[in-house]
Amino acid sequence: MTDTSPKSGNKKRKMRSASRLYAVQALFQMEQSNQTVDAVRVEFLDHRFGAEYEGNQLEDGDVDLFSKILEDAVNHQARIDQLTDRALVAKWPLGRIDPTLRALFRAAGAEFFETSTAAKIIIVEYVDIAGAFFPDGREPHFVNAVLDHMGHEVRASDF
């Protein structure tokens, strides 16, 4: 029997949000350490999902969503990076962007291209992640603008 209570839906949403955060972290780690997608996926599934860290219990993630975002971000990286470049101003090419933001744009781009999740949900989720990484900065506003541009280009019908 499947639990369809509001708490069940909230738990599923939290797991999906956690998976997006983990995907950004994993993509960042892959870029910084030159690890393969398979090695990073195993590390996250074995040591991060639901782990206890500094006395805090980390959220379990949606394994399927996490894996899909990683695979799609890697498999479509050139296409996603081109989309991101078009959303950035000329004097700020993707190579000059903070690596955490690069990972975030790649994860969000993978979802824009390869999932049926509404563009507005993708934008809100990744702006929230930017806020977690940069709580006192302007980055969440920047992320919102770039993702809005990306979403309009890829998913115009969602707006």
Image: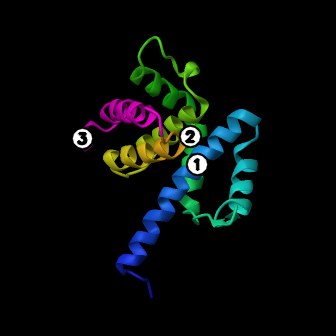
Kind of residue sitting beneath label 1: Ala
Left or right: 33 with respect to 12? right
Position of residue 122 in the picture relative to residue 31 (left or right): left
> Alpha carbon of mark 2 to alpha carbon of mark 3: how far?
22 Å
Q: Residue at x 57, y 28 (%)?
A: 98
The quarter of the image holding the N terminus is bottom left
Q: Amino acid at mark 3?
A: Ser
Can you identify the residue that label 2 sits on? Answer: 73
Majority secondary structure in the magenta region: helix
Amino acid type at circle 2 is Ala
Residue beneath label 1, please? 23
Within-10-Å neighbours for mark 3: few <14, some 14–19, many 20+: few
Helix, strand or loop at label 3? It is helix
Residue 123 x/y as whole percent: 37, 43
Residue 47 highlighted magenta (yes or no):
no
- Tell me the quarter of the picture where residue 151 sits: top left
Q: Nearer the viewer, residue 123 or 151?
A: 123
Residue named by callout 3: 157
Q: Within 10 Å of the Cα at label 2, are there few (<14), some (14-19), or many (20+) other Cα atoms?
A: many
Residue 35: percent from left, percent from top = 76, 40
Residue 126 found in image quarter: top left
Which residue is pictured at 51% across the width and 17% down the height?
93
Q: Are marks 2 and 1 in contact (CB under 8 Å)?
A: yes
Residue 50 lies left or right of residue 79; in this view the side is right
